[in-house]
Image (cartoon, grey):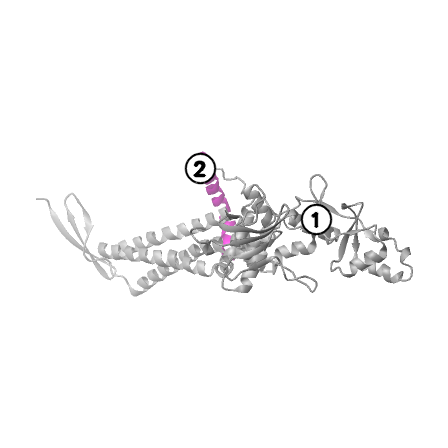
Amino acid sequence: MGLRAVGFCVVGKGILVHEAVSGVAPRCGVVAELVSPMVCFLFFLGMTLSIAVAGFISGSETAVTGASRTYLYHLAKKGNERARRVILLQKNMSSSIGTILVMNQFVLYLIPIGSTLFAVKHFSLAETAVLQVAIAFLLAIYAEIFPKMLAIKFAVPFALFTAPIISRAVRFLRPVISVMEACARFSMRLMGVKIDAPEPEDQADDELRGAIEMHSSEEDEEATQKKSMLKNILDLEEVSVSHIMVHRKNLYTINASLPIEKIAEELNNCHFSRIPLWQDNPENIIGILKIKTFFWALQLQSEHLEKIKIHNLLSAPWFIPETTHLLDQLQNFRKRREHFALVVDEYGDLQGCITLEDILEEIVGEIVDEYDTLADGVNVQPDGSVIIDGATAVRDLNRQFDWSLPEDDAATIAGYVMHEVRKIPDIGQVYMLSGLKIEILRRQRNQIVLVKVTPPSKSTPSE
């Protein structure tokens, strides 16, 4: 049996008990060094402040990444300097996140190391284990969960508050972060990840559409109208003028060869402000007559109508291709300060006309003035079916009834039916197209004039 020795030594105000056994290292006893109240207070104060700093850094990461960029741009334009800093942090997201993560990891490493060193010196083994579990629990709640929940709830205010601190930290730690980013990029290249690949062209529009859908309320009628108008604006660059133009069949024109008295009689009952004039044949448009200009000339030469030369009152017609997108045409209207354009196909044949009001109606909805008629060719029946004029635009029906009829193949409901069935249907024929029951009610020669559409919920199983 080896030599056994027991010794006591006085350390501070406590007693340290240890045993020394021949050939065995000393081991801690039951009683450790007693801790003074001040030392204990300073330790827990330091731990509290460290956890608070870790929580602030962790919340900053969530706030900077989650703050609404559109709202920040709005604040920045109003002169908010902190909003501008947050935008810069978001634009350089890799450096911002790298800086925040380095700071957060540094603090999270210091807390357990400091607490362990303190506990080993002043507490027993069991007390040290309890302390570490408690600190880990507090770190999980107050350094991760709580600050992130707070940052999600108040993303923009949190980001504005933390922006100056994070911005300075990014500049201070830039050399370290640059090295880390280089290592990360090199690793990604080894894995075959293309970090500089461009974003899809339509991603920005899709993000904007998603933001419109996300920030709108279905219960608020005003918000729903705003959402609809914003979505319509985005659709302008995808819709061509052929989808909304007034077809040449419905185009109001006047023969320029008519006598002035006859033209005045025609224009007296006209509620349009601009009228195309043709010569020799209706598709040979020679100019556009402004009603105000004509009646002004008529007033000046009221006693000598033969002096009025109708050709001198005409402005040159403006022809545009039918493939022109509405957004481009809207910008062209603004540049030329025009309100009226004639649409032609690839062969130069007249297809119809489009006005500035037509494009504005695509954004805000139908504009009805004192000269417009309220009958729009769409009549909802008591049984839920809808009787529709064949010339009604498919886009208008989709927006009004939330249908999903294809808009690429035909502009009108009549054209859509003929495109789908690949023939000119007879009166009374019924088709199921895009989940809708469509019945042909009236046909004039080769044109579908009237159809009846019944939504699925109103159709019977046998039908």
Q: CA distance from mark 1 to mark 2?
A: 63 Å
Residue located at (46% from left, 37% from top): 193
Pointer 1 or 2: first along the chain: 2
Which residue, given by chain and number where applicable, does mark 1 sit on? 248
Which residue, given by chain and number where applicable, does mark 2 sit on? 187
Graded by Cα atoms within 10 Å as few (under 14), some (14 to 19) or many (20 or more), the crowding at tag 1 reads some
Q: Is residue 135 magenta?
A: no
Residue type at mark 2 is Ser
Image check: 280 left or right of 225? right
The residue nearer to you, when weighing 171 against 355, is 355
Bounds of the magenta span?
164-190
Residue located at (43% from left, 58% from top): 56
Residue located at (45% from left, 61% from top): 153
Q: Is residue 185 magenta?
A: yes
Residue 390: where, in percent of width, then height? 60, 51
Residues at discs 1 and 2 in contact (Cβ within 8 Å) = no
The residue nearer to you, when weighing 300 against 60, is 300
Residue type at mark 1 is Arg
